[in-house]
Image: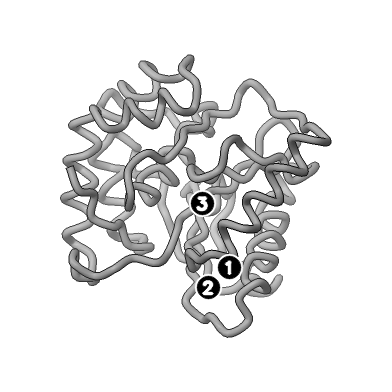
Amino acid sequence: MTWIPLESNPDVMNKFLYKLGMPNKYHVVDVCGLDPELLATVPKPVLSIVLLFPFSDKYTEDNTKQEDEIKKKGQIVTEKIFYMKQVEPNACGTIALVHSVANNLDKIDLQDGHLKKFIDATKNLNPDEKGKSLEKADGIISAHKEAALEGQTAPTEEVKYHFITFVHRDGHLYELDGRKSFPVNLGESTNDSFLEDAARVCKEYMSKYPDELRFSVVALTVAE
């Protein structure tokens, strides 16, 4: 199967997640800016942040450098992290949303459906096995295709962007990028500071591309 890119569009993302069993009290919303006054407008609590950014040779070089440093120094990664590798091109949007939900099941009462079935079946697999299992998850694939076709981008357009997810688990901020070899622990965080901590890292990504304006940030939130 050829995966059609998913847009960074809250309406599209919500339809996708609701179809897969996420209750409609949870919403993906736009993050309109990363300064404190704009972050204050994001509904709380925030369960995840998803960043869309330009895919480039610099990104690949930075990944290699970061992974080499982590392998040398080591890092602490909680066993509670659900992390999967990206196997298929253009599947990063779906993987980012799966990471968002799968790492918040203590807060999200996920209904029976294709996503719950997938998470339950793969939670004990390694990241590569999880990624390969997505190739066989027909229900998720079908929902992805349906959501992607609702977007504004023509399916034939060349995609040069990539989705990654930030979550808070066990007192730390984690970056979950399916193109990396493992989750990345970005340091201490709390439920209260998570949004600001993730926004800081998003700003760091943006600073690497000073001439690039096409970034997008969305948040998975709860409507209390």
Crowdedness near tag 3: few (<14), some (14–19) or many (≥20) residues, C-alpha within 10 Å: many
Q: Which residue is mark 2?
A: 32
**122 up-or-down from 28: above or below:** above
- In this view, the mark in front (2 or 3): 3
- Residue 223 versus residue 173: which sits nearer the camera? 173
Q: Which mark is residue 164?
A: 3
Query: Which label was assigned to residue 219?
Result: none
Q: Amino acid at mark 2?
A: Cys
Q: Tell me whether the residue at label 2 lies in contact with that at label 1, contact meaning CB atoms closer than 8 angstroms.
A: yes
Residue 115 percent location from the top left of the image: 32, 30
Front residue of 165 and 5: 5
For the residue pair 31 and 212, the one nearer the viewer reads as 212
In front of the other: label 2 or label 1? 2
User: Type of residue at label 1?
Assistant: Thr
In the rendered image, the quadrant that contains the N terminus is top left
Left or right of 107 in this view: 139: left
| Element assignment for label 1 | loop
CA separation in Å, label 2 and label 3: 17 Å
- Element marked by disc 3: strand
Mark before the other along the chain sequence, 1 or 3: 1
